[in-house]
Amino acid sequence: MSCEIEEKYRIFRSRARAFTLIELLIVIAILALLLSILVPAVQRAKEQAKISVVNAELYTIGLGLEAYALENKNNYPPTYVSCMNQSHFYQLPKELVSAKYLPGKRDEFGPMSTILEDRYNPGHTYKYVAPGDLVINQGQKPVKNKSKLWVPDGFPDAELETGQFYFNPKASPVTWAVYSLGPNFDLEDQFVIDLHYPVPQSTWYDPGEHKGIFTRIRLTNGEQTGTF
């Protein structure tokens, strides 16, 4: 009789531990729901952290530019372009590296002037453009008042769709702009080209569209504006 009771107890415990198919499906559905909530939240947190780092690094570059100007009679480094590698247009000026305001080169003979890399454009530095001197290809002498920067009329407080290119730094309302290409940037997009980035606010990062550049801009009055 005791053996029969033990067997019934063993069967009861076995059944008590097992999940039914319906219970298993409910658990799977709950886990899927939690994942659908958590994964986008984690991705948004990671993206926001990346954005914060980019804006912080643009701030650091801005400090370097101001320190350089203090040591060079309020003159800023020239803008760099490359005929041989157009993807490296407007890379950060090597003067900031030689003055030790930015970390040194990855490769002495490579295309990048510094190891400070645009987190949205790997293998390239952040971009720098300013009205005034222009260096076409590394090692060439700067050409005076050849670098241009589009500034909208009324920028930054009452920006209009109209504006103009400035070549002379003394006439421009903007001293310089440093920027990251940001997510989903397409250099071949005619709409992007027509917007004359990086100064117009219409080209700045839009979290709703998850698109646009991150920028830091110095006005001639010494104030700075941008996406920070």
Image (spheres, grey):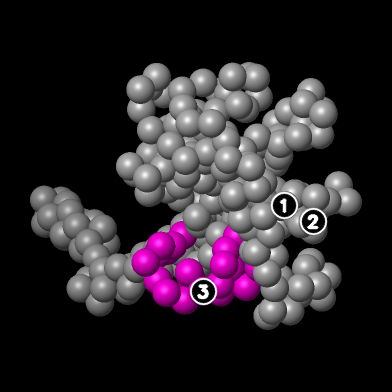
Q: Nearer the viewer, residue 156 or 147?
A: 147
Of pointers 3 and 1, the one earlier in the residue sequence: 1
Q: Quadrant of residue 203?
A: bottom right
**Mark 2–mark 3 distance (CA, rounded to whole Å):** 23 Å
Q: Which residues are magenta?
A: 183-208
Q: Amino acid at mark 1?
A: Asn
- Density class for disc 2 (Cα within 10 Å; few <14, some 14-19, many ≥20) is few
Which of 182/125 is in front? 125
In the image, what residue type sits under mark 2?
A: Ala
Number of numbered tags placed on the structure image: 3
Q: In the depicted view, which residue is nearer to us: 104 or 29?
A: 104
Residue at image position (56%, 72%) is 195
Q: Can you say whether 53 is above or below 104 in the image?
A: below
Look at discs 3 and 1 and give the one toward the viewer.
1
Residue 200 shown in magenta = yes
Residue 122 seen from this side: no
Expressed as whole percent of the image width and height from the top left, the position of residue 106 reads 41, 23
Q: Nearer the viewer, mark 2 or mark 3?
A: 2
Per the image, the residue denoted by label 2 is 171
Q: Is residue 88 visible?
A: yes
Residue at left offset 47%, top offset 40%: 136
Position in image of residue 69 (x %, y %): 77, 31
Q: Is residue 93 magenta?
A: no
For mark 1, what is the residue? 168
Say which residue label 3 marks: 194
| Secondary structure under the numbered disc 1 in the rendered image | loop
